[in-house]
Image: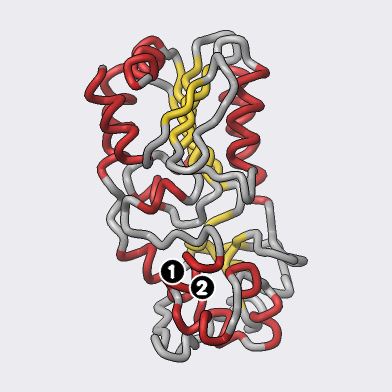
Amino acid sequence: MFTVAAELVRNAEALIITAGAGMGVDSGLPDFRGNQGFWQAYPPYARLGLSFVECANPEHFQHDPAFGWGFYGHRTNLYRETVPHGGFGIIRDWIAQRDLPCFVVTSNVDGQFQKAGFADDCVLEVHGSIHWLQCLRPCSQVIWPNNEQIPVDQVSMRAGHIPRCPQCGGVSRPNILMFGDWSWLPERTHGQEERFQAFLAQHADGRIAVIELGAGSAIPTIRATSERIGWRYPGATVIRINTREPEIASPHIGLACGALEGLQRIDAAL
């Protein structure tokens, strides 16, 4: 099947990368799928009996901002320190060698594609990005780069600094769509969505290789996006790379492995 996937990449006229949480695992980022994975990454929350869903909730910024920023400050620091794995470079090499138009659609908020050198105007972050901030209220529609330094106590997981809105001085929050969210500003993501729709329209009649990386079914946004493209556009074929859930109906193909291994084995077959 890796040979088939390589042939699809070789013959593609456009490339779409759809990526979920599994894309970051090979870079050493925590696997948040299921409470056990989350608690293994964050033992203090295990002691408190708090799940990922409960921690990733904007109400904490309102009622206890040191707690809210403890979680998101730690993640900000982690993503800044993380080096994207070699799979990102493999995709960039394919783009360069074959002069392939490419767009990335990801549910990850970590900014790893941009860090790996992908153009910001060719990335759709469907849940927003931790590297951008907004007012919690919000007092305006403004979002701004997250240049904050946020020390976090590793025992209590509480932040030693609370980022503030430069407009009103109130608490700020990441420009991320959280669980039970009421104040997320979606304009940046909407702009990305418009660019992606324009990309699809431009390549609608061509051969499109959709490479889905580490996207699970618990929050099926990315899997649904891949499948929608695969069934809507006659020249599109999905290559689903997933350790746990690689199943997809023919003519699309599933590869039961991690993101980095899958990309390496496709690259070796090219």
Q: Residue at x 59, y 82 (%)?
A: 49
Separation of residues labelled 2 and 1 (CA atoms): 6 Å
**Disc 2 marks which amino acid?**
Tyr
Q: Residue at x 65, y 19 (%)?
A: 231
User: Residue under circle 1?
Assistant: 76
Q: Nearer the viewer, residue 97 or 153?
A: 153
Q: Nearer the viewer, residue 140 or 39?
A: 39
Secondary structure of residue under mark 2: helix
Left or right: where 188 falls relative to 265: right
- Assign the N terminus to one quadrant of the image: top left
Q: Residues within 10 Å of mark 1 (few under 14, many from 20)?
A: many
Q: Which colour style is shown?
A: secondary structure
Residue 72's disc number: 2
* Outermost residue toward the right in this view: 182
Determine contact: label 2, label 1, CB under 8 Å: yes
Q: Residue at x 67, y 51 (%)?
A: 187
* Image spot of residue 262 (x, y percent): 34, 33
Q: Is residue 25 above or below residue 180?
A: above
* Image spot of residue 118 (x, y percent): 38, 40
Left or right: where 206 falls relative to 85: right
* Image spot of residue 205 (x, y percent): 58, 8
